[in-house]
Image (spheres, rainbow, N blue to C red):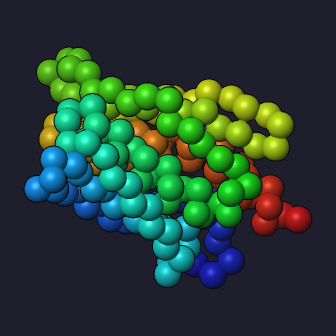
Amino acid sequence: MTAGAVRERLRFVEFDFRRLPSGGCQARVVLEWMPGQQFVGVAEGIASQTGSLRCAAEAAVRAIEQSINVRMTFELLGVKALRAFDSTVVIVSLSSHLETASRRIVGSYLTEDGQERGAALAVLNATNRLLGNLFVRTESR
């Protein structure tokens, strides 16, 4: 980025997903706002098809909430992988809360493999427009 440029969206930097011997899973998501300014979210869950997707999505939510210092919070309502048009689409539903206002948002990500990574990216797709507006509003003050 050039000097003085303002990024309007968080950037997906790294994703790690592991199935644990205990029957659980762990996901780690790294997001970046500006070069060198990274936010890490980690979540654990049950290693089932739905549990793995939820674990990955929760890790993304935690990384996002770190980036905004809890000015806005998100609640993961659901995550689902669907087959459509010979591909897999991962869809997430979230509730966002800012002061007294709440709204539901939805995000999706088309993936050929790596449904867990797709769940984390779907969360980022759902939240990035809201976050861009929040960051721009905060920086202009």
| The residue positioned farthest toward the left in the image shown | 21
Above or below, comparing residue 129 to residue 95 in the picture: below
**Count of picture labels:** 0
Side (left or right) of 11 relative to 114:
right
In-front residue for pair 19/94: 19
Percent from the top left, x then y, of residue 55?
34, 46
- The residue that appears at 76% across and 43% down in the rendered structure is 98
Q: Toward the viewer: 27 or 1?
A: 27
Q: Tell me which residue sits at (32%, 31%) in the image.
A: 90
Is residue 118 visible in this depiction of the protein? no
Residue 42 percent location from the top left of the image: 39, 60
Q: In this view, does 15 lie above or below 5?
A: above
Residue sitting at the far front:
22
Q: Examine the rendering and report whether any part of residue 79 can be seen.
A: yes
Where residue 141 sits in the image (x, y, percent)? 88, 65
Q: Quick one: which residue is furthest to the right in this view?
A: 141
Query: Left or right: 3 with respect to 11?
Result: right
